[in-house]
Image (cartoon, rainbow, N blue to C red):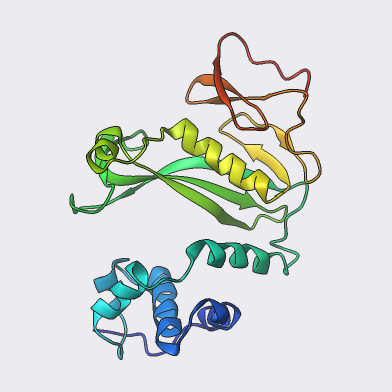
């Protein structure tokens, strides 16, 4: 039976902080419902979230809020990250770590947009899932939170919709560029490899930054030109 009768305090605080991103009270309520559902609902679907509330509107209202209402998720995310800078335990520092990796979010419905079959190394099997590349910020005190993400879409899916195909490396570089454009300080952590980036010295023009990704080494210039390299990786000039 539905059990949620009020929003958690953390959700109420978020709605007050982001009130300016929504034009009316119903939008703010749907925002609160969505946040609450992502935290506590057993099923993180529109129907699953809607069914958790004792008093709510039809699930189609929440669905339209997520898919049709023109609030800007990019602006909301930038505001969220700015909000986190007010707390010393979640503030950016030069000793922070920017961890980038991909994760599979499994699904059961084959009709979900961009879902596909992927090999799950940890489980040793193929699974129907979304493949996300996520940049997370790890603070010196141990707290961590997502910065931004990209969703991988297979080449045949892109061909069917007429979209440009981006492989994991290109999506990875987009996340690096996104982070650098915002001057977020810290070290990048890429599996067992990383490079140093500071607030005032992102990628100097005088050299390219080398990194390994999925077994291949590449060079990223400040203009984000990607060139495949051969041979050994050297860090002596960093």
Farthest left residue? Answer: 110
Farthest right residue? Answer: 200
One can see residue 51 in this view: no
Q: Image check: 222 left or right of 64?
A: right
Please tell me which residue lies in front, 105 or 230. Answer: 230
Tell me the residue at 61%/67% (across/down). Answer: 79
Tell me the residue at 64%/15% (across/down). Answer: 233
Residue 186 in the image, given as x and y percentages of width and height? 72, 44
Q: Image check: 188 left or right of 3?
A: right
Residue 128 in the image, given as x and y percentages of width and height? 24, 44
Please tell me which residue lies in front, 114 or 138. Answer: 114
Please tell me which residue lies in front, 2 or 158. Answer: 158
Tell me the residue at 57%/21% (across/down). Answer: 218
Q: Image check: 126 left or right of 99?
A: left
- Count of labels shown? 0
Residue 172 in the image, given as x and y percentages of width and height? 51, 37
Please tell me which residue lies in front, 195 or 114. Answer: 114
Where the C terminus falls, by quadrant?
Answer: top right
């Amino acid at each position: 039976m539905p059990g949620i009768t009020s929003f958690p305090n953390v959700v109420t605080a978020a709605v007050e902080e982001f009130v300016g991103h929504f034009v009316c009270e119903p939008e703010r309520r749907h925002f609160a419902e969505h946040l609450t559902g992502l935290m506590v609902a057993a099923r993180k679907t529109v129907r699953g979230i809607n069914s958790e509330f004792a008093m709510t509107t039809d699930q189609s209202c929440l669905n339209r809020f997520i898919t049709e209402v023109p609030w800007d998720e990019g602006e909301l995310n930038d505001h969220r990250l700015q909000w986190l800078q007010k707390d010393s335990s979640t503030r950016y520092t030069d000793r922070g770590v920017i961890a980038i990796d991909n994760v599979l979010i499994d699904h059961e419905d084959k009709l979900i947009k961009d879902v596909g079959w992927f090999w799950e190394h940890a489980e040793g099997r193929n699974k129907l899932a979304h493949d996300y590349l996520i940049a997370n910020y790890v603070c010196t005190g141990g707290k961590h939170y997502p910065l931004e993400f990209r969703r991988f879409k297979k080449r045949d899916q892109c061909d069917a919709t007429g979209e440009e195909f981006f492989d994991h490396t290109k999506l990875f570089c987009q996340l690096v560029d996104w982070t650098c454009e915002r001057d977020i300080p810290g070290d990048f952590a890429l599996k067992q490899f990383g490079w140093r980036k500071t607030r005032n010295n992102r990628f100097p023009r005088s050299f390219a930054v080398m990194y390994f990704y999925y077994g291949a080494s590449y060079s990223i210039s400040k203009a984000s030109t990607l060139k495949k390299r051969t041979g050994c990786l050297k860090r002596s000039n960093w």
